[in-house]
Each structure stands twice: as structure tokens, then as C-alpha cells.
Amino acid sequence: MSRGDAKTFTGKLVRPRWFYRQWMLAGNRALFFDRLVRDFGDFVHYRGLFDFHLVNHPDLVKRVLQETHDAYDKRSVVYDRFRNAFGDGLVVSEGAKWKRQRGLLQQLFGPVTVKRYFGAMVDAASGLADEWSRRTESGTVFDVAHDMNGLALEIAGRAFFRTGFDQSRDRIHAWTHTVNHYSSKPPLPVVRSFWFPSPLNRRLKRTLRELHAFLQELIDERRERGGDEDLLSVLLQARDETTGEAMTDAEIRDEVLGMVIGGHETSSAALTWTWYELHRHPEVEARLHEEVDEVLGDGPLDVEDVGRLEYTRMVVEEALRLHPPFWFENRNVVRETALGGERLPAGSLVAFSRYSLHRHPDFWNDPERFDPERFRPGQEENRRSTYASVPFGGGPRICIGLHFAMLELVVVLALLARRHRLVVDASDRHEMAAALTMHPKYGVRVRAEPRQPRSRR
Ligand code: HEM
């Protein structure tokens, strides 16, 4: 079989000795999982403080997420921790509840519907471009991860509760920080229990009380006065197609919380990595500038022109392959099931790391290299397996915010790259961190240099 052919999984399950390199879990978890697949292959049964089956082959990932998805659910130690933070929203709900919510919400996040939020994306990106222009004059060094986080939260905040966001921006920042911090901690026994009175558990409970009260206030306001054309109003009006039922306030609160927090952390990590890679690859940056000048020039960006930003999209997809923000996935086996020639008993934990999967040498040439050409539509490398790069997951639980996120990433990148290039400063200290999301541990310290967009041809 040539390297270009799609490969099927022919490997065997390997069981390393108990507690193999367990200590690595205390450090960078993505590097620990990567070490396991490098040492033992694409199907590993790890036994130690945690017991899990690690899969690292697109065929096995496809089987778990899509082909036999109903043999799995998210009642795992990892998702239980999310449940404490996000309630019972779509990210963690199961069975009939998940099906109903997914049906209700799906219509709000289709490729056409998300264009409603294009204006919020353009406004936020243009505001930041103005701010960067001020900084170019003073030569200020800043952390682009911080800026991308603020930008993505602003976009999500405005999309979900347009006016409420402006009044409460700082509080929302602080709350989301706590929820993220909590969700990113490893699910250690005892400490992970929500009743355990650790400082972090107490802080999370306080934060959730405040956040729920804030969301409830906005919901009451929308109910009384009708409201903005934001996602919160749309959620209040959404009805189940068969029963005609609306969501309860608590359900709406949980959904908003999961989507605003989950959605903005991932998008901001993706954008931060993209800037980092553009700095390291001037040839890619030059090609991106060429396209942005061609499509936007110095004029406004029209929503219909976004489809023409093909290379910009390829850059984003390659950044998502090499630096998948939501890098770790896991499932609980609900009933005995077959996987990779083995029978996994109910209660097994199956996991995979997108960091390792997306760098699989059988599916990507020179996988560590940043090369957007891999994602040129119709390109051979891109077609080896649809599950070789799954930054948004796959199967029925694929990210519901995929179209929103892709529109956001392409629009933000195009609008910012048109007016500035970022140069990583000598003071930058680079290290990858893998917590809830994969991100540069110390941010990315940069200076912005002005660009003169060529007028549109
Ligand atoms: C670059 C940005 C994003 C990335 C990389 C990302 C990635 C993911 C991944 C990997 C999953 C899990 C799939 C699985 O369990 O198999 C997921 C689920 C989810 N994401 Fe995203 N996401 C992003 C942006 C967003 C945005 C903007 C929103 C909301 C507007 C969102 C809302 C959700 C929800 C609600 C789920 C749960 C879906 C379900 O289980 O039915 N995400 N996302």
C-alpha cells in the first residue's frame, strides 16, 4: 500500500506494564499520550491511576464517534467534571435530553443561519485592528493570546446576549476564567468530587451562583420586553418540532453557559496558534496577504465574499490540525462493544488525543510541518481519511458550533491580517500547555507592524 492510500487499522491492542510513565500525567498530558502511542502504537490499554483504552488510528476514532456511537456515552470521570461546571447542557447531556436539545439548537447553527452573527465578528475584529494600530505607533509588546481571548469572548457574548455583554464584560471575563480553570484540572479521586470543600470547588460554586443569577436576569428581561436579535432571544422562542415545547430557563442557562465558555476558549486558542504559525512561516503569511488583498482590498468585507477566502480557510484548518484546541476526547462504554478486534466491557474508558492523531505519520507527510496546502480542496493528502483530522469531532456529537467557529476564524484572521502583521518578540517564552484547551502556556508576546492593503483589483 502506498503512503497515499487510506490505511485500515490492522494493529493489535498493547498493554504496557502497570503505571507506565504515570508521573508524566502530572506534567503535559498531551505529551504523555503522545509518548504512549509512540511507544506502543495505535491501540493501548493503559492501567494505572486511571484505566483507559487509548486509540490513535482514524479507523478506531471513526468507529467510536460514528459507526458504533450508541455503544458509548459521556458519563466518564472527565466529562463528570465538565458536568459540575456546565450543568446538563448539550456538551454533556445524554439520551433523550441530548436528542431533544440537539434538535432544537441545530437549526440555530446551520451554515446560513450563523451568518447573522457576521456583523458581530466584523465589529469586534475591526475594533481590535484599530487598537493594534494605536499600539504600532508606540511599539507596544503585547500578548496576542490575551487579545484573541477577549475578542472571541466579545463575539460569543454579543452573539448570545447583545446588550447584556457590554454592561458586564469584566464580570463575564472573571467568571469564564474560573469555570475554565476548574474544567481543566485532572479528575483526581476525592478532589474531583463536587462535595469536597477545596478552595477551587468553593470558588466554582460561588461563580456559578453569580453567573446563573446574571443569565436569569437577562432571560427575565427578554421575556418581559422582548428583545434583541441575539441567540438568547432565539433560544427563548425555540420550540420542539414534535411536541411544541419550549426550553425551561434552567435549560437555556446551561446551554448558554456551555456554548459561550466552550466556544470562545477554543476559537481563541485556534486564532492564537494561527498567528504563531504565520510568524514562523513568512511564505504562508505572504500568500495569505495576497488573498486578503485580492478579496477585501481596502474595502469592507461582504459576507458573500467569505467563501472566496479559500487560502485563509486552509490556513485555519492547518492550524486546527497541528494545534487542536479541544485536544482530548473520551467516552464511556455503555455496553460491551467490539473495537479494533477486542471486546471492551461496559464501564471502560476510551480516549484519544487529537494532538497525536492529527500528527499520525501514516496520514500526513512530514506531520510536524505547518503546510496549509494539505487542505487545498481535492488534495490527495486531505482525502486519506476524514477522521485523520477531527478538530470538531465527528458523528452525531460533532461540534454544533462548527460553522459559527469557522466563519469567525476566517473573518477575524482576514480582517486583522489585512491591516497588520504580528512579529513574535524576543521576550516570548514558548511552551505548549494542554489543559482544557491546548494553548501556548505563556501566551505569545508580539509587536504589531502596520500593513498597507492593496486596493481591490
Ligand atoms: C475552533 C473552535 C471550536 C472547536 C475546535 C470545537 C471543538 C469541539 C469538539 C472537539 C467537540 C466535541 C465533539 C465530541 O464530543 O465528539 C465540540 C462539541 C461542542 N461544541 Fe465546539 N468547538 C469550537 C467552537 C464552538 C462554538 C463557537 C460553539 C458554540 C457556539 C461550540 C459549541 C459546542 C457544543 C454545544 C458541543 C457539544 C455538541 C454535542 O455533544 O451535541 N463549539 N466542540
Image: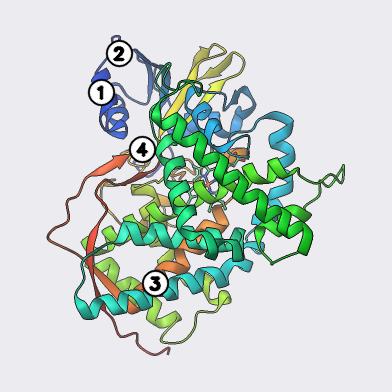
Question: Which residue does the numbered mark 1 point to in the structure image?
Answer: 39
- Residue contact between numbered discs 4 and 2, judged by CB atoms under 8 Å: no
Question: Which residue does the numbered mark 3 point to in the structure image?
Answer: 128
- Residue contact between numbered discs 2 and 1, judged by CB atoms under 8 Å: yes
Q: Secondary structure at mark 3?
A: helix
Sequence order check, earlier mark of 4 and 2: 2
Nearer mark to the viewer, of 4 and 1: 4
Question: Which residue does the numbered mark 4 point to in the structure image?
Answer: 435
Question: Badge 3, how many Cα within 10 Å: few under 14, some, many 20+?
Answer: some
Question: Badge 4, how many Cα within 10 Å: few under 14, some, many 20+?
Answer: many
Sequence order check, earlier mark of 2 and 1: 2
Nearer mark to the viewer, of 3 and 1: 3
Sequence order check, earlier mark of 3 and 2: 2
Q: CA distance from mark 2 to mark 1?
A: 9 Å
Residue type at mark 4 is Ala
As drawn, 58 above or below 135: above
Sequence order check, earlier mark of 4 and 3: 3
Name which residue lies at 84% across and 44% down.
Answer: 245
Q: CA distance from mark 4 to mark 1?
A: 23 Å
Place of residue 124 in the rendered image (x, y in percent of width and height, measured from the top left): 47, 70
Place of residue 69 in the rendered image (x, y in percent of width and height, measured from the top left): 61, 29
Identify the image quadrant of the N terminus. Answer: top left
Outermost left residue: 426
Q: Is residue 215 left or right of residue 173?
A: right
Question: Which residue does the numbered mark 2 point to in the structure image?
Answer: 16
- Residue contact between numbered discs 4 and 1, judged by CB atoms under 8 Å: no
